Amino acid sequence: MSTDDGSCPIEVHDLTVAYHHRPVLWDMDALFPDGKLIAIVGPNGAGKSTLLKAIMGLVPLASGFVKIRGNTGKAARTAIAYVPQRGSVDWDFPTTALDVVLMGRYGHLPLFARPRKRDRDIARQCLEQVGMSEFANRQISQLSGGQQQRVFLARALAQQARIYLMDEPFQGVDAATETAIVDLLRTLREQGSTVVVVHHDLQTVREYFDWVMLVNLRQIAFGPVEAVFTHENLQAAYGGRLQLLTDVGEQMRQREWRARHE
Amino acid sequence: MSDLPPWLAFFTFTSVNVVFVTAGCMLIGITGGTLGSFAYLRKRSLLGDALAHAALPGVCVAFLLTGTKDPLVILLGSVAACWLGAITIDAITAYTRVKEDSALGMVLSVYFGVGVLLLTYIQQSGNPNQAGLDAFLFGEAASMVQRDVWTLAGAGGLACFCVVLAYKELKLLAFDPDFAHSLGFNRRLLEVFLSTLIVIAVAIGLQAVGVVLMAAMLVTPAAAARYWTDRLGVMLLLAAGIGAASGFMGAYASYLAPRMPTGPWMVLAASALFFLSMVLSPRAGIVPRLYRHLRQRRRTAEENVLRTLYLLDERRHRPDGHFSLGEVIEHRPMPLGTLRRVLLRLERNGRVRASSVGLFTLTESGRARGERLTRLHRLWELYLTSKLDIAPDHVHDDAEEIEHILTPELEERLLAALNHPETDPHARVIPGLRSRSEEP
Amino acid sequence: MSETIWIILIGSLVASSCALVGCFLILRRLAMLSDAISHAVLPGIVLAFLISGGVGLLPALLGAGVFGVLTVVATDLMQRYGRVQSDAAIGVVFTVFFALGVVLISALSGQVHLDAEHVLFGEILYAPFNTWTVLGMDIPRAAIIMGGVTVLNIAFVILCYKQLKVCAFDPQLAASIGISVVFWHYALMAAVSMTTVASFESVGVVIVVAMLIVPANTAYMLTDRLGWMLILAVIAGILSTVGGYALAALLDGSIAGAMATVSGVLFALAALFSPTHGVLIRRRRALRLEPSDPNIGQAGP
């Protein structure tokens, strides 16, 4: 499961992340297990997306570190495929679904090289896996929300990473797409990949996931679903008695507090 | 007819020409600052730039149609072309997938190109260098006559009057257009209205300061004003003021150097005011921010040393200990020079006292401070471990930061949340709980 | 070769090199930054004239290039440390530089025989007469320089296609697969600066902006594939040049102005009639409620 000899896919230690001087994640420790489907749940603004971004190195850390298979640094992050929330892309960009998936291969190509036939084949396969083959040549703004989501999943697959981070992949998709995505995640798990998903729907946690992490500005619990997904922990996560923490954070923001690492 | 040197003679305002030029430039600055504020808030600062370039074909067509170079005709031509340009920009962004920055750039360059073409056609010269575009490019502020000033005053006054009239609608449009729409305001109409006002400002100012520099009047004073306030009304007044000051300084500089056009000096003046604002304004200026940061660092360093002295006392189980610098550094590593400086400051503030050679001790107020900081530190550690289940070995670093931030009010809430505890996670006593110590 | 051919060739080279980098410029929403660069280079040119003591081309290019890069850097710094919003930063920076340039020109009008209009409009009409001797032939230097720039831009776009594309489309993905968004931003802006500066001798600084962004937007309206967009932009640029020459000949007016005009007309045509994204086509589709559009009846992106 989780060990310290570097085979642990993601290790987070004493992680604190601040946004505009206000901490949104406090002192988090976690060893993510290999080959499992892991959900991260918590109320809005709990810092779940921030956790993914911190693991990806997209936001600076106020304290602590993140290790990917025992390594830190940019090279380590290429072992992860990250699927952010849908809003962050220019939908009018002249690119088709296949093009988007092909971009997932760019990390494997040297500086001036063009994608080769092999890359194109992989891209097509990934589109197939998410059921979007017939849309390969559609410009992305012509796709529905669920279809766009699937294309971005296909892109993550094309990266051929063994660790996947997904930010609310089920948000706003229709039932058919949701089933398709769940099947895909299970296939990935069968292949031995680790999949970490920020999930918004508590009803489906038990059904879809092996492990779950409850987050509300800090980690409340992390472990197998049967052990951790309890009424008590959910109360702690969604109970909302963290006004003090929020207000302290607000003080830091107002005073433009710079932590020791900055 | 005075014997004063030029730099003083300006202020006698005896020359009518001087008065007109100065007044005209100030009016342009006021109008530009006011309307530019709205453009700035709508993130369309460069609209003035685009429209100013777009005016050129209007001037040419007006000439072609009427055969005269009457200023009023030229003005009408400018307004018409600017307005057409504004509509084109809106149409492109609303009806095509082209993005706003491209729409601005296309209108700017294509309209200007059409203008250059027409101008050379009129001059029948194929070569635009002979087309006498100087006036359009750089303006002719120096040749302003009374009539020009009245035109400027009239149009500028009209624009400002409209702003006052439609103030709350324009305010909504600037900050939250969707909300304005949901309240029933016709958003398109408002946008057109605002664009029209900007068109008028641009067309008028063009005559005096030229193309690029009119664009500046719509950007720079507003951007400068933004640094000083968060309130729209104040921002408008400040922007108008900065615009007026730029106009005045521009006219003055141009008076001193008669061969130079006024426009660029206005822009340089406005830009200087902008840079001053960016660097010095108390709210968001670079220097004040830096200063606040440094002051915060100093205060933190002082508080850390106080706390260390308190802890050293605590360890010996008696107060009034005298400690050397070495002992302090052993407990809390820091450069010797830094420690000396901090102790000097603490001495000046009456928090520590230097006893015999090289030894320091806490004063009453210093002790109270140290006690408070330690209390806050341990309370916070307790909060993190007991309420948030954070591992005990992670909480020290956090508390080292937070102890400097907790206000008395937050302290009260902390105590209440923890149910007035006695010891921290490491089984140390939380000091000073019984007595509600006042802030020294 | 006749002057007409040279002029059209030079104009086409200008349009092509501009169109190639212009496509990425508009996709990254930096169109107005190119306008800013084109105005802000003025003091660089004046200073170059002053320092080199003459009307040499190379110093002017160098001076302009320096100020081009300065503009990008200054805008960036102001946004980051001065907390200025991007459009205002651009506006403040380029107007200051331009004002400085005008002041310098006026102040030094005795020493610097420089017409501001010369800088602003270029003189493609005279380009064929300004030649360098290469391999025994007299070739207009504008053709040589623009030819070189075009080749460089083609190489840049082809070799660095993936990086430019992914940085424009999804900077987050770029960062997560190890591509430095900052580096490629400056690489692109360096190419734009170089192209702008090389072109201004022919068409002047304002029309260069037209050549950078209008054909690119025309292509943007016509296709959904980036590769095709680049090709179509070049074609639109060349058509603008040819059409512009004809129009200018007809009216006996400025060629650069005519080029910009024709490019605008082409854009308008594409915007209205494009089979994929044209305004008229979309109107017709909406009226007919064509079922092929999956976004009807569903929340869009």
Image (cartoon, rainbow, N blue to C red):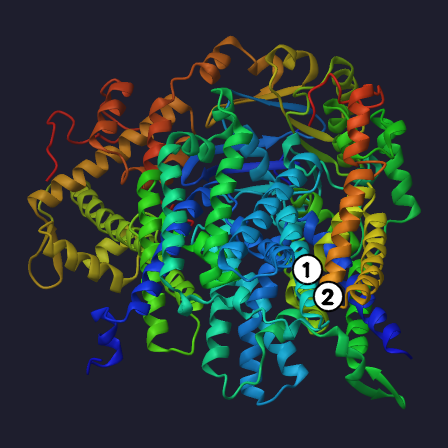
Q: Residues within 10 Å of mark 2 (few under 14, many from 20)?
A: many
Is A258 situated left or right of B300 in this image?
A: right
Observer-nearest of B42 and B278: B42
Q: Amino acid at mark 2?
A: Ala
Q: Which residue is mark 1?
A: B113
Give the residue at mark 2: C256
Q: Is C300 left, or right, of C275 in this rendering?
A: left
Give the percent coordinates (x, y) of residue A115.
Answer: 86, 49
Task: Kindly identify the residue that appears in the image at 43 percent across and 34 percent down.
Answer: B170
Indicate the quadrant where residue B38 lies. Answer: top left
| Discs 2, 1 touching: Cβ within 8 Å | yes
Q: Chain of mark 1?
A: B
Check disc 1: other Cα within 10 Å, few if <14, some if 14-19, many if 20+: many
Quarter of the image for the N terminus of chain C: give it.
bottom right
Tell me the number on the disc at residue C103.
none
Residue B164: image x %, image y %?
35, 36
Q: Nearer the viewer, residue B231 or B116?
A: B116
Q: Residue at x 51, y 38 (%)?
A: A13
How many dots with numbers?
Answer: 2
Provide the chain ID for the residue under circle 2. Answer: C
Label 2 residue SS: helix
Tell me which residue sits at (62%, 21%) in the image: A199
Q: Specify whether residue B104 is in view.
A: yes
Q: Is residue A207 shown above or below A20?
A: above
Same chain for the residues under marks 2 and 1 in the image: no
Res. A45 in view? no
Give the vertical position of A29 relative to B148 (above or below): above
Of residues A210 and A26, which is closer to you in this image?
A26
Q: Position of residue B33 (x, y in %)?
A: 39, 50
Secondary structure found at label 1: helix
Q: Amino acid at mark 1?
A: Gly
